[in-house]
């Protein structure tokens, strides 16, 4: 590997570890904004001139019926889709054209609706690999023959162990991810997003397919991370009960537009929201 690339990699690690220790407290300032975002698929307008502002330190839920445009909006924010028009601003920077892995480096991570974990690898290895989203598993063999890369491995292991502790995954540390229940897989997925030390975590329907008990465990894990690290969460979520339990604020989308916004209890009473959900 090129020396310059290695330097950049290690700089990245130490930068992040510093942020890890000195996390800014929640101040309610906007940390992330979508401004007038439009996404089209052929003739379908999936997201129609949507503006959303995410405040630092909040748990924001985006709800709405199927096809409302929630996933499309999240994909524009994480960089997987390019919007037809509009901008994404993160920590004051215009990141509209920035590729996903660079957004991750800046502190904007996501989990996936359909888990992208390495099913044949252990929980610990899956979390450690999260430090190198651009190299995938190759980095593990690479660390065997570069002596000073062991330092990285030590660091990654320490961080992974911290997250295993935080998300109560000790028992499963050496279990193969493919053998775990969906609820545990979601917790591993969250741990993997956190190893990159994000300031904002985007989650697309994290509760989908989980039992009531698994949902409660995952909700508790999210709250734990939020409270100990002040991490900002943006959750697209179908389960209204979960949303009412954990969100500080809710945005409701329908047919590509934002139709309501407010505290969970306000939104639940909103006539337009009830209408949109009655259509389900
Ligand atoms: N990759 C795609 N290609 C074509 N149409 C898409 C694609 N993704 C989403 N859509 C369409 O865009 C609209 C919004 O979808 P989506 O963002 O997935 O909504 P939600 O997540 O709220 O269910 C839907 O009409 C959907 O069929
Ligand atoms: Mg969706």
Image (cartoon, rainbow, N blue to C red):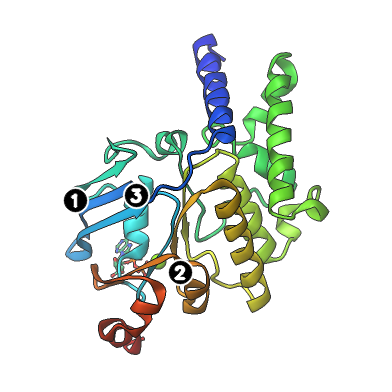
Ligand number 2: quarter of image = bottom left
149 is higher (above) or lower (below) than 275: above
Tell me which label, 2 or 1, sits earlier in the chain.
1
Mark on residue 84?
1
The image quadrant where one finds the C terminus is: bottom left
Tell me which label, 1 or 3, sits earlier in the chain.
3
Considering the numbered disc 1 on the image, is that residue within a helix, a strand or a loop? loop
Look at 55% across and 54% down and name the residue there: 226
Considering the numbered disc 3 on the image, is that residue within a helix, a strand or a loop? helix
Counting other residues with Cα less than 10 Å from the Cα at mark 2, is it few (<14), some (14-19), or many (20 or more)? many
Label 2 within 8 A of ligand 2 by Cβ: no
Look at 64% across and 76% down and name the residue there: 211
Look at 23% across and 50% down and name the residue there: 83
18 is higher (above) or lower (below) than 268: above
Left or right of 54, for residue 34 = left
Residue 1 placement (x, y as % from top left): 57, 15
Residue 175 placement (x, y as % from top left): 80, 52
Residue of label 2: 237
The image quadrant that residue 277 belongs to is: bottom left
115 is higher (above) or lower (below) than 247: above
Counting other residues with Cα less than 10 Å from the Cα at mark 3, is it few (<14), some (14-19), or many (20 or more)? many
Mark on residue 248?
none
Asked if the residues shown at circle 2 and circle 3 are in contact, with their CB atoms under 8 angstroms apart, the answer is no
Left or right of 46, for residue 79 = right
Residue 61 placement (x, y as % from top left): 41, 65
Look at 57% across and 23% down and name the residue there: 14
Distance CA(mark 2)–CA(mark 1) = 25 Å
Considering the numbered disc 2 on the image, is that residue within a helix, a strand or a loop? loop
Mark on residue 77?
3
């Amino acid at each position: 590997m090129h020396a310059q690339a290695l330097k950049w990699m290690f700089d990245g690690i130490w930068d992040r570890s510093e942020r890890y220790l000195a996390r800014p407290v929640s101040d309610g300032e906007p940390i992330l904004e979508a401004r007038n975002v439009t996404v089209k698929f052929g003739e379908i307008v999936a997201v129609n001139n949507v503006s959303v502002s995410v405040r630092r330190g909040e748990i924001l839920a985006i709800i709405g019926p199927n096809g409302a445009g929630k996933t499309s909006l999240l994909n524009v924010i994480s960089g997987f889709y390019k919007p037809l028009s509009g901008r994404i601003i993160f920590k004051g920077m215009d990141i509209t054209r920035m590729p996903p892995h660079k957004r991750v480096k800046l502190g904007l991570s996501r989990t996936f609706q359909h888990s992208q974990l390495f099913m044949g690898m252990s929980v610990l290895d899956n979390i450690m690999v999260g430090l190198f989203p651009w190299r995938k598993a190759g980095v593990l063999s690479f660390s065997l023959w570069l002596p000073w890369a062991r330092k990285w491995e030590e660091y990654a292991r320490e961080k992974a162990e911290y997250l295993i502790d935080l998300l109560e995954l000790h028992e499963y540390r050496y279990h193969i991810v493919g053998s775990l229940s969906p609820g545990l897989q979601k917790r591993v997925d969250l741990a993997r997003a956190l190893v990159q030390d994000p300031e904002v975590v985007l989650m697309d329907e994290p509760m989908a397919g989980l039992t009531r008990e698994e949902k409660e465990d995952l909700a508790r894990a999210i709250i734990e991370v939020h409270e100990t690290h002040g991490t900002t969460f943006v959750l697209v979520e179908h389960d209204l009960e979960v949303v009412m339990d954990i969100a500080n604020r809710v945005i409701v989308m329908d047919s590509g537009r934002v139709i309501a916004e407010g505290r969970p209890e306000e939104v639940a009473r909103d006539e337009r929201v009830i209408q949109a959900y009655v259509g389900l």
